[in-house]
Amino acid sequence: ETGVTQTPRHLVMGMTNKKSLKCEQHLGHNAMYWYKQSAKKPLELMFVYSLEERVENNSVPSRFSPECPNSSHLFLHLHTLQPEDSALYLCASSPGGQGYGYTFGSGTRLTVV
Amino acid sequence: KQEVTQIPAALSVPEGENLVLNCSFTDSAIYNLQWFRQDPGKGLTSLLLIQSSQREQTSGRLNASLDKSSGRSTLYIAASQPGDSATYLCAGTDRGSTLGRLYFGRGTQLTVWP
């Protein structure tokens, strides 16, 4: 384990379902991120939270809704997804500020049917 | 917009070889650079971080360098082993971004056979 824990590891959902992805970090970091990794594409930044405040939304459709109740937890709420949303969703954290590296979780493999 | 190119896209070698993986950025103004390893279906494991004041980092058989004038980085793997088989990703952050948004390449898929 890297210090960033994601659950569930795998998720299969229908297009009308509502589900949530969870991320928890035990590193005392101030910034948390959601990234999406689709087949044959580079990782794409979705959302950035700093000290529980959303500071970046990278043109992500509203069917993805993030929530950061405290600096240790990050959620991604999913509803009415499309099959093209099937991907590996990765959570990461960093201390914030320049000069620090990222720590990633193991990801949630999402399949939309 | 920053774009990252990794060469080669795939590499298959016998164990024991010394390897060079390349990464380049369209905008050379990279602040930090990080190399990651990703095993199939898994998350990213950080290998090396080159901070803004540094040009090189080493960990065991791995060495990474960054030429900020050209925006190019190289990951050197010495005496490769089958356990090194994975996808290697480079990522960089821009200056001026306190949250250090990472720009990723598509990765180099490495296979080391016995």
Image (cartoon, rainbow, N blue to C red):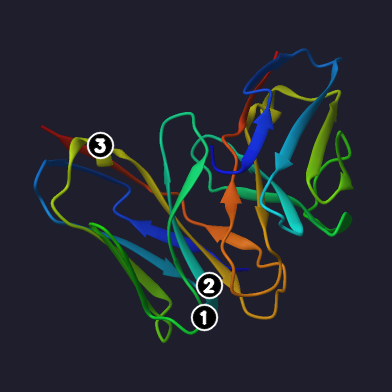
Host chain of mark 2? B
Residue on which disc 3 sits: B83
In the picture of the structure, the residue carrying the numbered disc 1 is B52
Q: Give a yes or no on whether discs 3 and 1 share a subunit.
A: yes
Direction from residue A113 to residue B65 in the image, left or right: left
State the image coordinates of residue A41 (x, y, percent, origin top left). 53, 43
The disc, 3 or 1, on the residue closer to the chain's N-terminal end is 1
Label 2 sits on residue: B32
Image quadrant in which you'd find residue B75: bottom left
Q: In the rendered image, which quarter is residue A99 located in?
A: bottom right
Place of residue A12 in the rendered image (x, y in percent of width and height, measured from the top left): 69, 14
At horizontal 87% and vertical 45% (from top left) the residue drawn is A68
Residue A27 lies, in percent from the top left, at: 66, 51
Residue toward you, A18 or B24: A18
Question: What amino acid type is highlighted by mark number 2?
Answer: Asn
Identified at 70% across, 13% down, the residue is A113
Q: Amino acid at mark 1?
A: Ser
Give the image quarter of residue B39: top left
Front position in the image: B35 or A94: A94
Q: Quadrant of the N terminus of chain B?
A: bottom right
B37 left or right of B1 in image: left
Quick one: quadrant of the C terminus of chain B?
top left
Which element type, helix, strand or loop, lies under badge 3? helix
Mark 2: few/some/many CA within 10 Å (<14, 14-19, 20+): many
